[in-house]
Image (cartoon, rainbow, N blue to C red):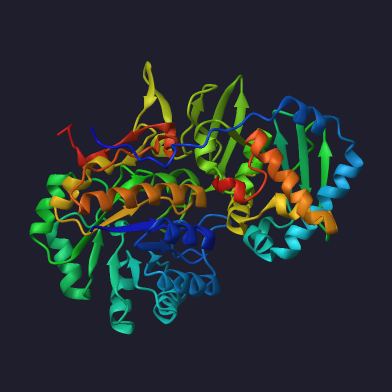
Amino acid sequence: MPEALAPLPEHRAIPRMPALLALGVRLAPYPPGDMLLTRLARKILARNPGVLERLGSYRRSRFVLTASDVPVSFLLDLTRDLPAVSLHRDPPAGDARISGSLAVLIGLVHGVWDGDALFFSRDLTVEGDTSAVLALRNAIDDAELDLGQELATFAGPLSGLARRLIEGVERTTGVPLTRSGAVR
Amino acid sequence: MMELVCPAGTPASLRAAVDAGAHAIYCGFADDTNARNFPGLNFSRREMAEGIAYAHARGAKVLIAINTFPRAGEMELWHRAVSDAATLGADAAILADLGLIAHAAERHPSLRRHLSVQAAAANPDVINFYASAFDVKRVVLPRVLSVEEIATINRDIDVETEVFVFGGLCVMAEGRCSLSSYISGKSPNMNGVCSPASHVSYVEEGGDLAARLGGYTIHRTPAQAPAPYPTLCKGCFKVGARTGYVFEDPASLDASQLLPALSRAGVTALKIEGRQRSRAYVAQVVRNFRQAVEALAEGREVPVGALARLTEGQAATAGAYNKIWR
């Protein structure tokens, strides 16, 4: 018998978002969430100008990301001069929508899973402008973002503590909340 | 050891391929000159220069695909791509068009020339012609040949051969397929896109996922069933009383278990398809195949890969390499 490839799992299993965490996201007040996520998006786009460059003609699009297991939708609105993110209970109108579990959406950003493979396995669905979806997927994949790290820096002098807290949640839930968690 | 030629659609993927053990990376400029001209994909000149520097510093080569067919009146775009590939220090240009190969041979003789799969060179006569007329050093063989046919070709030529071993599978003689043009007006040959995303839409219909290309439903996938790429050749149609895949089942190529046979057939390089895929795909597939070619070189049994989840339709085939239908 041929030997097996030891350290290379076929496919990192997609973790389920713990019910308590999902409930927390669902019940979180939207206005502060909108403000935090908008700040996060602006910071990321300012630090990674390549994302908008790769978006090309889609840099003025409205992208809807639906976390189907929570459920909550994020609207990334690039039509304004300053990008904005807002949370919605029901998916808002947009140019393109990407839906999957919250872990899938976060894991895609951190390069854990392949978007096409998630599409083949039906863990990810796309609607609307397919070109815009591809442009966003490729732009984000190239940027090698670390959402956990970016969020932690908001804690200022306590960013180290915030980072450890995020990593703790990551270890407990299996959801890849940081880029380094993507390779664990 | 057989050379592992790996895809990169972005600089991040290029670095992932190098870090995972690619011997060479193939990639393209962000325009119509390469056959993966997808939104958000490919390299600016600056990114290409940085990618080449990253690869060379780690002992890997960079091959630039300029493998679409130039349009009349717009030759400058393709000529500039060849010129920039030479200037940036690419290890080879992968070319398909006869005129562009002649141009490259005449104007940039020191730039190594590989013949793209898009040229569909599938017999010794045509390969020897490219070699003698334009000093082509390597030919990427079309995915319609059996291992026996590859061995026969290698016996009668003096140039290197490169074959696809993993990823998306075209059943057509590449560079000559017009299915995408027929339905969308755009093709991989002229525009670098097969079934362009701009013409694709997905709609949930009664629990099924309907894939539409150019407004026509070409596939309807039941809930929980694996989905294919929205290409016409993988479309599922009603013909008479039967419903099925008229051209090809949605499956990806996986020739990992044929590596010993391909090595015996005289193949120089193994190519992984997937410049449109993510850095996660690139890292995983390259790591698997690097282990496989190392095992083969050391006389060990080629390990069984574990890449099924990454394949289209979550199914794999050895394609034409095992041509059992003849």
Answer yes or no: is residue A26 visible: yes
On the image, which quarter does residue A158 sit in?
bottom right
Question: What count of labels does the image hold?
Answer: 0
Q: Residue at x 62, y 27 (%)?
A: B204
Q: Residue at x 54, y 36 (%)?
A: A119
Answer yes or no: is residue B142 visible: no
Q: Where does residue A36 sit, x and y in percent of width and height?
A: 85, 49
Q: Is residue A64 above or below residue A68?
A: below
On the image, which quarter does residue B120 sit in?
bottom left
**Of the pair A87 and B296, the residue shown nearer to us:** B296
Q: Where does residue A177 sit, x and y in percent of width and height?
A: 67, 44
On the image, which quarter does residue A89 sit in?
top right
Q: Where does residue B113 sit, x and y in percent of width and height?
A: 29, 71
Q: Is residue B296 left or right of residue A118?
A: left
Q: Quadrant of the C terminus of chain B?
A: top left
Q: Is residue A89 left or right of residue B172?
A: right
Q: Where does residue B47 sit, x and y in percent of width and height?
A: 54, 70
Q: Quadrant of the N terminus of chain B?
A: bottom left
